[in-house]
Structures are given as C-alpha cells and as structure tokens.
Image (cartoon, coloured by chain):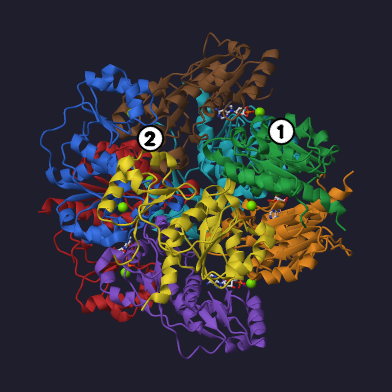
Chain colours: A red, B brown, C cyan, D green, E orange, F yellow, G purple, H blue
Amino acid sequence: KRTSFPEAVFCSGKSVAQIEAIVQSATERQMPLLLTRLTQEVFSRLSPEVQSVLARSDRSQTASSSVPPTTLQSGIGIVTAGTSDTPIAYEAAATLEFMGYAAPIVADVGVAGLWRLVSRLEEIRQFRVVIAAAGMEGALFSVLAGLIAAPVIAVPTSIGYGVSANGHAALSSALATCAPGVVVVNIDNGFGAAAAAIKMMRICQHS
Amino acid sequence: KRTSFPEAVFCSGKSVAQIEAIVQSATERQMPLLLTRLTQEVFSRLSPEVQSVLARSDRSQTASSSVPPTTLQSGIGIVTAGTSDTPIAYEAAATLEFMGYAAPIVADVGVAGLWRLVSRLEEIRQFRVVIAAAGMEGALFSVLAGLIAAPVIAVPTSIGYGVSANGHAALSSALATCAPGVVVVNIDNGFGAAAAAIKMMRICQHS
Amino acid sequence: KRTSFPEAVFCSGKSVAQIEAIVQSATERQMPLLLTRLTQEVFSRLSPEVQSVLARSDRSQTASSSVPPTTLQSGIGIVTAGTSDTPIAYEAAATLEFMGYAAPIVADVGVAGLWRLVSRLEEIRQFRVVIAAAGMEGALFSVLAGLIAAPVIAVPTSIGYGVSANGHAALSSALATCAPGVVVVNIDNGFGAAAAAIKMMRICQHS
Amino acid sequence: KRTSFPEAVFCSGKSVAQIEAIVQSATERQMPLLLTRLTQEVFSRLSPEVQSVLARSDRSQTASSSVPPTTLQSGIGIVTAGTSDTPIAYEAAATLEFMGYAAPIVADVGVAGLWRLVSRLEEIRQFRVVIAAAGMEGALFSVLAGLIAAPVIAVPTSIGYGVSANGHAALSSALATCAPGVVVVNIDNGFGAAAAAIKMMRICQHS
Amino acid sequence: KRTSFPEAVFCSGKSVAQIEAIVQSATERQMPLLLTRLTQEVFSRLSPEVQSVLARSDRSQTASSSVPPTTLQSGIGIVTAGTSDTPIAYEAAATLEFMGYAAPIVADVGVAGLWRLVSRLEEIRQFRVVIAAAGMEGALFSVLAGLIAAPVIAVPTSIGYGVSANGHAALSSALATCAPGVVVVNIDNGFGAAAAAIKMMRICQHS
Amino acid sequence: KRTSFPEAVFCSGKSVAQIEAIVQSATERQMPLLLTRLTQEVFSRLSPEVQSVLARSDRSQTASSSVPPTTLQSGIGIVTAGTSDTPIAYEAAATLEFMGYAAPIVADVGVAGLWRLVSRLEEIRQFRVVIAAAGMEGALFSVLAGLIAAPVIAVPTSIGYGVSANGHAALSSALATCAPGVVVVNIDNGFGAAAAAIKMMRICQHS
Amino acid sequence: KRTSFPEAVFCSGKSVAQIEAIVQSATERQMPLLLTRLTQEVFSRLSPEVQSVLARSDRSQTASSSVPPTTLQSGIGIVTAGTSDTPIAYEAAATLEFMGYAAPIVADVGVAGLWRLVSRLEEIRQFRVVIAAAGMEGALFSVLAGLIAAPVIAVPTSIGYGVSANGHAALSSALATCAPGVVVVNIDNGFGAAAAAIKMMRICQHS
Amino acid sequence: KRTSFPEAVFCSGKSVAQIEAIVQSATERQMPLLLTRLTQEVFSRLSPEVQSVLARSDRSQTASSSVPPTTLQSGIGIVTAGTSDTPIAYEAAATLEFMGYAAPIVADVGVAGLWRLVSRLEEIRQFRVVIAAAGMEGALFSVLAGLIAAPVIAVPTSIGYGVSANGHAALSSALATCAPGVVVVNIDNGFGAAAAAIKMMRICQHS
Ligand SMILES: Nc1ncnc2c1ncn2[C@@H]1O[C@H](COP(=O)(O)O)[C@@H](O)[C@H]1O
Ligand SMILES: Nc1ncnc2c1ncn2[C@@H]1O[C@H](COP(=O)(O)O)[C@@H](O)[C@H]1O
Ligand SMILES: Nc1ncnc2c1ncn2[C@@H]1O[C@H](COP(=O)(O)O)[C@@H](O)[C@H]1O
Ligand SMILES: Nc1ncnc2c1ncn2[C@@H]1O[C@H](COP(=O)(O)O)[C@@H](O)[C@H]1O
Ligand SMILES: [Mg+2]
Ligand SMILES: [Mg+2]
Ligand SMILES: [Mg+2]
Ligand SMILES: [Mg+2]
Ligand SMILES: [Mg+2]
Ligand SMILES: [Mg+2]
Ligand SMILES: [Mg+2]
Ligand SMILES: [Mg+2]
C-alpha cells in the first residue's frame, strides 16, 4: 500500500461480529493489525480464538495482532498537560510502538505551573517531533511551540467541563494559536497524531 | 446610588438624538458621564453644544463630560498579549482614569514569546489587580495567573480569524483555564473589566 | 509557591490509580490537598490507606487530606438562585473552608420572586466579595450586582433543560450583563469562584 | 380571512419592484397594508405613486397605506430595558396602532438599576398584556414576570456585543426563565409581539 | 403572592432530601404544591410520609399535594403533532388541572398528513388559547397559527435525532414562523406553556 | 465527461481575472459555460470581449456563454414560500433552462396561509420533480411533501432574521421533516437543486 | 393515501403501550406497518400478541407486520464508507425491501483508500439511484457524485468522535459538496433515504 | 531566537500607526519582517518612508522588508482544490519564499472531478511535505492523504456559503478525516501552514 501504514481499526461503534471478522481476515492475510478504542468490555466478548491472537493494553485501549518490533526508532516525544490526558498519550504511544518508534512521555507539564514545563525543557528539545496532548483551555500548545524548534502536533483532549466539555475549547486554542508551527488533529485523536508524527519522520527518507 | 458608579453610556447602536438627550440630561443634573464606543463619525454628528461639553479620546473611543481627577490611585494594571488588543486596553484605561485610578499598560507580552512576559514580570507583580486583554487563543490568561498572586480579570478580545473570529476561542480559554483566580468579562468589555477592578480595590475600604 | 494555593485535584476523569498516586505523593510531601468532583462511588474504590487520610464531604463532593483550620476569616459570602444550585455552592464553600475562610450561604433567592432576594439584602451587603451561583437564565447576577457594591463572582450552573441545558444560557447572561462589576468563572466552577474570591480578599494584604 | 390580520410585509430582502407590486396590488384591492423594516433608503427609491399612498415613520421603520384608526383600544403596554431597545419597541407600537390599539411605552427600566423598574411598577400593572423588549442578558424578562400578573411577551433584541451579539443571549434568557408566564417571539420581532398581544386581547371576545 | 401561582417545584436535579424538605414545608404551611419531572424512581425513594401526601401521575411525571378542584374551567386546549409529544402534553395538562382548568388534548395531528389536522379543526377552533407541542421540524406551529384565530403557545419538544436532537430545530421553527401570533416557551416546557395559557385566560378578569 | 454536466462556475469570491480566464478557456474549447452568483458589479468589470460572449440575467445573477436550447423538456417545477425566495428560484430556473429544461415557478405559497398552497395544488401535482425554496421556518417542505407524490428537493433560503438568519432554521426544518421523500441541498443552492432535479429526470433514461 | 407510502413508525421515544396500540390498530385495519428504531430491549417488552404479528430484524432494528413482497424491483443501490455505517445501511435496506425494492449494499468503500471505491465502480454504475452512507468527514459523497451519473442521496451517519461526533461534520460535507447532484437527508436517516429513493424511481411512472 | 522564525506581523486589525512603528523598529534592528493580510488600501496609507522599505505582493496580500533569498530550497508543495483557494495558497507561497523555500502550486485539483487530481499525482508525489488548501466540503484532504506518503497540512479556506460559510465545514472535514497523516491549521491560515511545513523540513537537520 502506498501510504505504508498497516491497517488500524477504530473499534468504537463496531459490533463484536464485525471486529472478529476484521481480525480473522487480517490473520489469514498475515497482515499486522492495530485495534484502537477497544474496551475491556468489548474485548471480553470476542471469541477465544480472536482474543488469543490479540495483545491488548488497558491503559491505551489498543490491541495488536503482531509481535512488536524489538528495536524502536527515536525522535518522537509526547508531552501532556495533565494527568487526565494520559489515556490519549497512551493511544499515541501504542501506535508509535506498533509502528517501530519509541514513545517517551513527558507528563503533567501544563502551563498553569510554568516551572514544571521549563524544568523539562531540555528533555523535550531532544525530540524531532513533539506530540502535545492537552484539554481544558489548551494553553500548553502555544507556550510549548514558542519554546522549541520542532513541529508540535496538538491533540486537544476532551478533558474538562462547562465550556471545555468535549474538547472544543482546547481545539480552538490549538488552531488559533499565534505560535507558528503548531498543527492539529481531531479531539482525542492520539492515533492520528502518531501517524502524522511518523509521516514527518519519514520526510528525511523521501527520495 | 449604592454601587457608587457614575453613569456610563454604551453608544454603539444609539442614535445621535438619543446620545444628545443623555448628555444634556446628565449635564443638567451635573452628573459626570462616561461615553464608550463613541466613534469619531458619530461624535462629529452631535450638536456643537453637546460636543463642547465632551472630551473625546480617539484611541479609547470614549468621551467624558467631567474634569478628570488630578491625582490617580495606583494598584490596577493592564497587560495585553498583542498590539491588536490595545483598543480594548485603552477602553479599560479610560474608564479607570475617569474613576480616579492610574492605568499603566504592559503591552504585547503574549506567550508565544514567553521571554517578553517573563522580562516584565516584576513590573506586573506590583499590581494588586491585573486586567489582561488577549485575543486569538488567549493563552496569556493561564500563564499569567500561574505566575502572579493578584486576581486576573480576563478580557477576551475579538482579535483573530477562523476559529478565533469574534473572540470566542479566547473567551473559552479564559473560562476553561486550569489556573485558579482568573475571572472573566464579556469579549471586548474593557469597560466592565475596569469596573470590576475598581470594585475589587474597594474591598479593602469595606466596613 | 508564588500563587500560595495548595494543590487541588479535579477527580472527574482520573482513574483510581491516578488519584491514589496523587494523594500518596502529597501525603509524603506533607502537602495539604483538596480533591474536587470526588464521587462516593470513586471514593469507595480507593485503597483503605488512601481513604483513611481523606475526609470526604458528600454534599460538596470534595475531600481533603489536611486538618481544617480552626478559625475562619470572614468577608466572603455565597448566594444561590435555587435549591438546585446548592451542590456548586457547597463546592465553593468547601474550598473556602479548606483555605481558612468562612462560607456563609444565602440560598434560594432567585429573582423570579424578587422579595426573597430583597429580604436578605442587608445580610448579603455584609460580604466584601460575593459568589453567586445560578442556572437556568441566570438573571440573579444582574439584579444582585445592581444592588450591592461588592464584586460579584458569577458561577453559572448547569441547571435547566432545553436552551439552558449545560449552563450556557446562564453563562451568557453572566457575561452579557449590563451591571458593572460582575466577573465570571466556568460553568459549575465552584472551586474557581472560591479561589478568585480569596485572591480578591488578599488584595488588601498586597504590599 | 380567518385570522383577521391585515397583510403585513417584511421589506428587508425584497426588491423595490417587489415592494411596489405588493403595495399596488393591495391598493387596488383596497386592503390596508403594513410594511415593516422599510428603511428610508429603500422608501426613497419607490415610485412617487407608491410613496404617495404610504405614510412612513422613521423611528419604527414602518409604513402603512391606510388611514390610522381614530380611537385606540387600551390594555397592551410596552416595556424596554434600555435606550437601545426603542427601535424594536416602536415597531411593536406601530403595529399595535395600525391595528387599533394604543401603545404606551415604559422605557429604560432595565434591572441593573432595579429602582427604575420598581418606580414604574404601578403604571405597568395597568396593562393586561405586556410586551417586554430587552437585549444584552435579558434579565428584565424574569424580574418583570415575577412582579406582575399579566402575560409577558418577551422580545429579545439584538443589542450587545461579544456573547450577546445578535440577541441570542437575551433569547436564551427569555426561554430559560424560571418565572412562569413568559412567552417569547423571535429576536427583534416587534411586529410578532404586537400580533400576539392582540390575539391575547381578543381571547375575551371569543365566543 | 402577586402572580397568583401556587408553588411549582422542578424535581429534576434536586436530591431526595431537598424534595422532602420542600414538600414538608408546604404541607406545614398548607400550601398546595405541584411537583414536575418527578420520576417514579425518585418518588419511590421519598419517605412514606412524604409519599402519602402526594398524588403522582406517571404519564405526566407530576405530583400534587392538594385535592384537585372538582370543577374545571374550559377555554384552553392542547394539540400535539405526534405520539411522541404526549409526555409534554400531559405535563401541561397536569398543570392546567392543578390550577383548575380542563385540559382536552387533540393528539397526533402533525402536518405531514394535513388531513389529520384539518379534520380536527372545528374542535380546535373552540379553544380560546391553544398549546401546541411538536418536535422534529415543528411545522405544526406555522400551519396551525395560519388556520385559527386564538393565540398559539408553541412548546418545541426534544423529539427527533440528528439535526432535531434536543428540540432545537423545532424551537427555531417556532420562533422563525411567518405566522403572526405564535409565542414560544422553552423546549419540553409543558409547565410553562400551561402557566402562560392561564395568564392569558386571566386577561379577561383584569380590572 | 461522465456526469454529463457542462461546466458551472461559482463567481462569488473569484477575481475578475480568474473569471475572465475561465470564460476565455471555455470559449476556446467551445464548451458551454454557466456562471452563477455573478453580480452586475463584477460583470461590469469584465473585459468587453468576455462580456460580449456572455448573456447575463439580473434576476438570477447568472450568465451563460451558449445559445439557450430552443425546446425545453418539461417535468420539473419550482415552488417558493415567499416573495423573498425568488432570487434563489431564479438561479434554479436559469440552471434548468441552460440544461434544456423548462422551469415553471409557482410562487408565494407559504403555509402560514394554507389556502394559497392548496389552490395551486393540481398545478404542482403535474411536476415529476419539485424544487421547493423556503426561508424563515421552512414549514413549506413538510406540508408540500405530505400532499404530493413527487420527490421534493428542499432549498433552504437565507431569508429571515434572529434565529432564521442565514437559513439554518429552514435547513434544520428540511432535514428534520417527518414527511418521507424530502431531500435537501445547501442553503441558497438553487444551482445544486436544479442539477439534482435533472439527475432525477435522467433516471428514466438509465439503461 | 396520496403519497402511497405505508405507515412507518419511529419507535425511539415511544412507550411500549403506544407501540402496542399502533400495531394493534394497523392490524385491525389490515394496514402493512414498518417499525424503525425498535430495539431488541423494547421489542421483548411488547405483549406476546403484538410480538407474534411482527417480524423483527436485529441488524436493521426494524420490524414489519406484513408478509414481505416475493419479487423485488431493482434500480436502487446502497454504498457505505465504513463498517460502522452498516446499521444505517440496513435500515435503508429494510425499508426498501418492505416497499418491494431490492437493496444491494456495496460496503466499506471510503475514500481514504480510493482503490476500494474505484474497484467497485462498475457495480455502482448499474444503480439508477444511489444511497450513500458515510460518517466522520463524509468525503465519500463528493467523490462518488463526481464519478457516477445517478443521483446520490447522502445519509450522514453519527460515526466518529471529536468534531465528527453526532454526524454534523459529515452532514456539512454532504451539503457543502461542490459535486452537483448530491441531495441530503437527516443524520442516520436510512429510512428517509430509502423513501426518497423510491419516490425518485417512481418519477418514471408519473403520468 | 530559538524558534528561528523571523518576525511576521498580522496586519488585519492593526492601525496604520501601529504597522509603521513595527516596520520602523524592525528596520532599525535590521530584522527581516514579513507582513501578512496587508491590503492595498492600508498599504497606500502608510508613510512613503515605510512604503519604500516594503515590497508588497497583491495576490498574496503580503509585504516584506528584506531582499528575497536568491536560491530556494525544494521539498514543499502546495495543492489547491479550486480557483477560489488561490489567495490562501499565495499567502503560504509568499511565506515559504520569504523563508528560502520554493513554493510550487498545483491548482484546482478538487475531487469532484477526480481525474484532475489523479493526472497531477506524480508531480505531487515529488513533494516531501504537502500544503493542501480547500474550502466548501474539504474532501480533497482525505483523498489526497490516501494517495501520497508525505504529511498533508490541511488549510481549510473560508470559501463557500450556507453551511460552508466561514470555512467551518472544511475545517471539520480536515479534522475528522479517516486518512492518517493529515494535520490541520486554522481556517485561511496560509502563513501557519508554511511555517509548519518549514519546521517539518528542518526535522532532518535536527541533531
Ligand atoms: N483511534 C483512532 N482515531 C482516529 N482514527 C482512527 C483510530 N483508529 C483507527 N483510525 C483510522 O480510521 C480508519 C478507518 O477505520 P475503520 O472504521 O476501522 O475502517 C482506519 O484506517 C484508521 O486510519
Ligand atoms: N463599553 C461597554 N461595555 C459594557 N458595558 C458598558 C459599556 N459602556 C457602558 N456599559 C454599561 O452598559 C449599561 C447600559 O448602558 P445603556 O444602554 O447606555 O443604558 C451602562 O450603565 C454601563 O454599565
Ligand atoms: N417542569 C417545569 N418546567 C419549567 N419550569 C418549572 C417546571 N416545574 C417548575 N418550574 C418553575 O421553576 C421554578 C423554580 O423551581 P425550583 O427550582 O423548584 O425552585 C418554580 O417556581 C416554577 O415556576
Ligand atoms: N427511522 C426513521 N427516521 C426518520 N423518519 C422516520 C423513521 N421511522 C419512521 N419515520 C417517519 O416518521 C413519521 C412520524 O412517525 P411517528 O412519530 O411514528 O408518527 C412516520 O410517518 C415516518 O414517515
Ligand atoms: Mg496536573
Ligand atoms: Mg505582537
Ligand atoms: Mg426555588
Ligand atoms: Mg440605559
Ligand atoms: Mg404520528
Ligand atoms: Mg408572501
Ligand atoms: Mg473501514
Ligand atoms: Mg474549479
């Protein structure tokens, strides 16, 4: 396939029968498969055969049918504003690792306490591409992009209540930022952020 | 009047005849009057008599019928994220001065270039109450409130385009901030921010 | 820490393991900790050790790891429009008490029955700072601010249905009010209103 | 016609030729006609013949082709929150008078200064039906309906800026009010409010 | 009380303890009380004492603490577009009966099958005031108001899905109607529609 | 080209130079070309050469570079709710005629006066496909589709103010209708409605 | 009935008693009846008598009281973008079959993998009318309509999260498409799409 | 400066005096400066001195105070869906060239005519990073990202009317796409897309 991305399946809204059929078809074709948004509850209702070919991680709500790569490429890092953003960070991390990339996470460096971000800055500057996950007002995106040279992929998260319910305040912040170099994916889209980060890393291999 | 606020008139949407009547009535009652959102175009269509009792400032789009106080109280400061936020900052400043408060402005310290804010921090920390005006994604509110002890009155401004058109992205940021102590007024409401700041300053005189 | 606010943790959306880790870390560092939006259901799933260091209040859905202060400072008051706004008022009250402030509540004085508000007015005028919680159409904010000199911190609540579902009608009312001196926090943000009120009370100690 | 309402034409968005054709047809059929939202600019472009059969009022932006009734029925009153709401009040008044009803206006009694409303209350209580026009946050609707027994027809006006731009904040307030007996028409719909008021007055003649 | 409306309590969002307190207080003061949005589930958790003073109706989700009036006044009628709108119609009916008014319902006359409405028209024309409940696109309001002389109180209902989820499409239709004489209450507000209808009926008794 | 549609150019937002280039290219390739949303103001700024190959109609704001077909196919009809919807009806009509279809218009049959629609019903029932244009609350779509067997293509128009400003109320009505067989195009999209109607007429020629 | 559509009942939001009454009435009148959005949970609570006259399909959540036609007409086809859109496709298919039309489904041809659509194109070109169901960003509608001559009825589905939650992104795409000939029904409205497709097929029988 | 981006000034909403001050300050500091959204009208009101140091391009509405680089780096390409998207494409191109990158544009390859895109595909596949500008329904983003390996930076444009007015439909499409590797910037933000593309190109130089 031209885009060189293995199949990924968004499980939320799919029936057990549909997920089983997709996994079986991929297994037969010996295609590696990543499943996202696969809750424990749905996983437990899959047939034993299908369960047995899947390795599921609870913190990322993902599962994979392939043996993970043994060596991981470095260059991509994940930064989160708060503890509540970690599930999305883990979805991104699981996608990166499935694709052969290391996924270090610098957690809980939201800008209401600026020193937390500043004290981790040298670490963050090692990354060639940064995935940033933040909910509520999403101020992390602007501050971070003003401090580092790498492209920042903003993942607004649906963390918050009132005007930030559903992640739309953080999404607007990410898009409206006056810091150049911030690009945005859909709310809670850890998978898409990881996919974009990998495409960016592959720029250097383009011929 | 109990709230101890002189009359303020929001001129946008009022006819020339209505504004003239309000000014004349206040003049007769010898009441000081502040007019906001009074464009040069509307001002020029007022009768010479009414024009003659008003001192209008173009940068704040305000006018006042009273002699300004000669000594101004300190304690309130205004901080802006960008050059485009200055009209709103001037509306706040004109209101403060009309009410007898000094209105120092620390301009253009938006967080995409964090060093600009940090280098003005000691100055800002002198203020007992801070009015902060920011448009686009409004990240200034969160960062500022994390760095100072004073209450921050956020004035989202209608600066920007796309998702930040009309100031709603900055407004959501101000409300959704995870930094405690940020309070918010309507988009572009420099007048209201100044009025709130004065009410806060008066807390100490409450008996 | 400069802003002089103890740590507060928003529990909604955090896992049991995350809450336990935060409490344990704070306990080890002997830092007082306030937990908000901590339901009985989540509290009951915390480990006995963590439960034992927390005092939880059901009506405010908060918990605290520290011994409450024995003497409380006066000056801040809470006003609610209706019975349904009380959970938010209690969140504000719990935050105030955790920080050493008394938190008297004047309840159920919504303006559809104006005499209820008027009959409590002298009591409300004793407060230096007023937190007002109202849902539905939020008319209380404007009327109250027109009647008292103290700053009014409006907390729109997500009380209502149809156009007021989720608190957006009350939020718009609070922001659009023509009564000067109203400032606003996020929908249902009792914690933030209390934090802002305390910052205002501290204006008088600023040097 | 069953609903017993003479023809009314909303002129905004209609071409000069369309308006001329409608007036001519009504004149030929000797039907009384009310034109609303007819700006001076459009009026001046109508043919002299058409202009000559119309009496246009600038403050209400209406015109009528019929001789106004000499005696007017009482019972309906109009209340406005602010000076800026008067154009809408005049549209309602012009409609009422065209239909044979007196249209007394109690202006500028917005609730941020409650005493203004209270001092006019006995006058307002004479009305059997009250049309209330308010923009910004629309708190007048709730307070008024709590103080009088008559039905209140709320006309939200597009007065304000930021969150109240376009009248949606006032509209939500009117609909979300907890005061029983408030009914609502579209933003700026002075004509519709008058029509509804007349239908209510006619209840007593229903047989 | 001036507005002559007995107390009505909106139970959704109130705790069992709060509802019990309100009922007990009203019982002590011998005040008739109407409770709305009282689900069977919440009712069953009230204390036996409180349950014993309440007569609850499941189809309207209301309860009342007073003996219903034995003779009911006529003049108000309820019209619904579809079967799904009946719960709201019953809330209106329960409110009317609690207040001493008969509440005949003409059900399921939505305009996609115009003959259903037309065949019931003479019946509907007997009503002096009409409450109309409709969800989805709310076309009933316009058609009905064009066919009858009585005022139409539109209650948009939260019936539908996609763009009509939550009743906003029907609400917009009700407000935007080009038929004069339609007035609107909040989505699903059967109580408010009934209260407004009664206020209209009382116009004729105003002196 | 597979879809068998000549080129159509949406001129709003295109520069004079861009429009000239498109017309010249089409002329050279001898391709018939339809231009929509071409205002007189823009047309007058086109070069004389380009103007000379275009026949522009003011009421539809369209222009065409080809000789119109001499015989027109029947089967499609256009129905409008009000006078203000006619510009959109003319855009649809111009598109139909450009493509070789007659475009009879049944105007001003909005449902607030149901007899207007009913009296034209037999005429409308001759059409195999009906394009219906309505603004404000868009109730025409539901009523019409309940009365005829032909498919109804709803074109919501941006006619109205307040909640119907921009056509979103009519759009929601069209989509939420409970009358089966209504399909919808974008607000003000007379061109798209005509294109869809033609595709429907061609169903019968499909082999 | 003029529109020649058997009765269809939308069960979501109707009580068990209401559904039973509708089925019994139709059975007595020997009217064929289609029930949509009938969950297994609600079906199981219907009386045995009512259950016995209904044939329910789980994948389409529909039930029918009539013997299905033995021969089905061809001409209509259904295309889906992803696996998650199939429930809506099945609702459309069940409606088509109930009405006597075959309902072939070309599934999972979303445009992110364009070859999937292209490889099924000849099959799709056999259809005279195409129903297309797509969620997320709904790009399928534009691409498909650019490739085939038949009218495309777009059914946006509520598949997705973040900005595509609830189907509004797909709805906007369907309406805003620049491909002529796309018409749209409400989000998730498989029933309405089928009804519209049948009305289009009947154009050829119109006399 | 760490982010290695020369100063860029967004001129819309700034006064002539503000722009002059910014240019003069940059000239004094010998800092290259890019001005965006600088209309001819505003440019013509700048002082002759300031005009003389600026080279303004009308098609991109940008100006620059520095001599453009003589050799340009390749790797970034721009793709547009329609003619109307070109102003945004030119803003991106001007930014790229100001920063030393070539900016080839592949114009007018929107997906309603898929062959236009397919015929330019080999050309597009030469780019390491692709900026895609599209308005209306924004289907180009998904299709393009499914066909190429390079990261796609989506710039939704405010092209369209009705539901696509202001670019929000295209924005939602870009964010909701199921094609992995699409990242998004604000509506009409050609500058930000170029800045992000450059940051991506620099990934390969990161050490
Ligand atoms: N968590 C996720 N968020 C966003 N997109 C996803 C996610 N998981 C999978 N996808 C993408 O969604 C596409 C369509 O999913 P599916 O509905 O499974 O065919 C897949 O090919 C992935 O590119
Ligand atoms: N620029 C402004 N922004 C917000 N509120 C204002 C402004 N200027 C005046 N006001 C307030 O609006 C109230 C009503 O104004 P008016 O419409 O003039 O009666 C005044 O009493 C002021 O409190
Ligand atoms: N179902 C209802 N819908 C709308 N308003 C209601 C309803 N039930 C009661 N109310 C009104 O809401 C007011 C406030 O209710 P409460 O929150 O109980 O104090 C009551 O006085 C009633 O006027
Ligand atoms: N799944 C569905 N989606 C949209 N409309 C439906 C659906 N099922 C039935 N309908 C239509 O909704 C109309 C009103 O339904 P009801 O509320 O049952 O009277 C029916 O006559 C059908 O035309
Ligand atoms: Mg944290
Ligand atoms: Mg700046
Ligand atoms: Mg109450
Ligand atoms: Mg006033
Ligand atoms: Mg029905
Ligand atoms: Mg008309
Ligand atoms: Mg798929
Ligand atoms: Mg083009």
Q: Please, which residue is most extreme toward the top here?
A: B70
Q: CA distance from mark 2 to mark 1?
A: 37 Å
Label 1, on which residue?
Answer: C121
Label 2, on which residue?
Answer: B143
Residue for point 20% across, 39% down: H96
Q: Describe residue A176's horizontal placement relative to residue G58 as left or right.
A: left
Quadrant in which residue C143 is drawn? top right
Question: Which quarter of the rendered picture does the C terminus of chain F lie within?
Answer: bottom left
What is the chain letter for disc 2? B
Residue for point 58% across, 41% down: D16
- Please tell me which residue lies in front, B75 or E126: E126
Q: Is residue C157 visible?
A: no
- Please tell me which residue lies in front, F102 or G21: F102
Seen in the picture, residue F187 relative to A182 is either above or below; the reply is below
Amino acid tagged 2: Val
- Please tell me which residue lies in front, G7 or F204: F204
- Please tell me which residue lies in front, A102 or F119: F119
Identify the element where label 1 is drawn.
Answer: helix
Quadrant in which residue D10 is drawn? top right
Coordinates of residue H207 in the picture (x, y in percent): 12, 43
Quadrant in which residue H98 is drawn? top left
